[in-house]
Amino acid sequence: MISDNSLSRRNFWILVVNSTVAFVVSYLFVFYLNLFSIVFTAGMFDYDISFNFSHIIYHVKQTDWTHDSVKVIFGSGPLLTFIIGLLSLVAYASMSEETEKIKLYLLWLSLNAFNYVFSGIIIGIIFKVRIAHLFIWMYFNDSQLLMMAIVGFFGILITAFVMTRRIAFSANIYFNDLNERNFPFFIMSQIILPFLLGVMLVVLYFVPQIHVMEMYVWIGLAIILLICSVNISNYDPVYFDEEERSIKVSWVALLISTLLILLLRFTMNHEILLKWSE
């Protein structure tokens, strides 16, 4: 096989396609991890619930909510998401020298998971949704809510600095080194454009029921990627190895991902009612 990892227009768009697929799949995984954590923890308290591809409706009287149920239902999703983010980060670190494209999924899963938690705290407090219910039931005053928002903001910054090196070393999937010559090609095709196109595809997926989270959660991730890109641009050239690489579309991953996303979207198009109280 002839090695082809030149900085051509064709290879540029191949990288964009591969990374965009990984972005969309990882974000939807994080989203449905949160959704189904709410669905099944609601069953622990015999709360009837209905849901579709984007929303959850609680068939619960206001007087039936308790401190324990609110903590478990609205706290389990962010906790599970944070754990998944850590696990994917550890898995990615263990594969740091590998060139398998599964690293892209682990990279985007870590980024989306951490951003979903920390941006979710800020968005929840501003719009009084999701995890904000937990804070409200814990009787947080305005000062405490502000402190939690600051925690979310610093979580975004910490994520950026932790993920910078991981993003830089994802270049070894396609290149033998990362330097001033191929950095713009790499950062635009594997990170920036997949983020922009991925956001558009995710929003399109949720049309016409776009939740406030899917409207604003991207701001935090944009900040993370901007900081990472600036930091990487200041790196000295990084050499990986001399192994030959070829840039090609991951057709199997693209086909399977597309079919799963379409199946998920259309099977959950109508509300599904779970009467846990029966």
Image (cartoon, grey):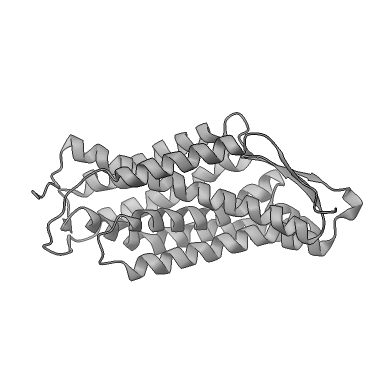
Rendered position, 209 above or below 235:
above
Whole-percent x, y for residue 90 in the image: 41, 69
User: Percent from the top left, x then y, of residue 127?
Assistant: 69, 43
Q: Nearer the viewer, residue 267 or 144?
A: 267
Query: Which image quadrant for residue 91?
Result: bottom left
Residue 235 lies left or right of residue 134; in this view the side is: left
* Residue 107 as seen in the image, left or right of residue 175: right
Residue found 56% across the figure and 37% down from its top = 265
228 left or right of 131 in image: left
- Residue at 72%, 59% (x, y): give it: 41
Extreme right residue here? Answer: 63
Q: How many marks?
A: 0
Residue 56, quarter of the rendered image: top right
Looking at the image, which residue is at 62% across and 47% down? 123
- Percent across and percent down for residue 249 are 26, 43
Residue 278 versus residue 16: which sits nearer the camera?
A: 278
Q: Residue at x 76, y 56 (%)?
A: 42
Residue 139 visible here: no
Q: Tell whether 202 sits left or right of 133.
A: left
Residue 40 visible at all: yes
Q: Residue furthest left?
A: 2
* Residue 122 x %, y %: 61, 51
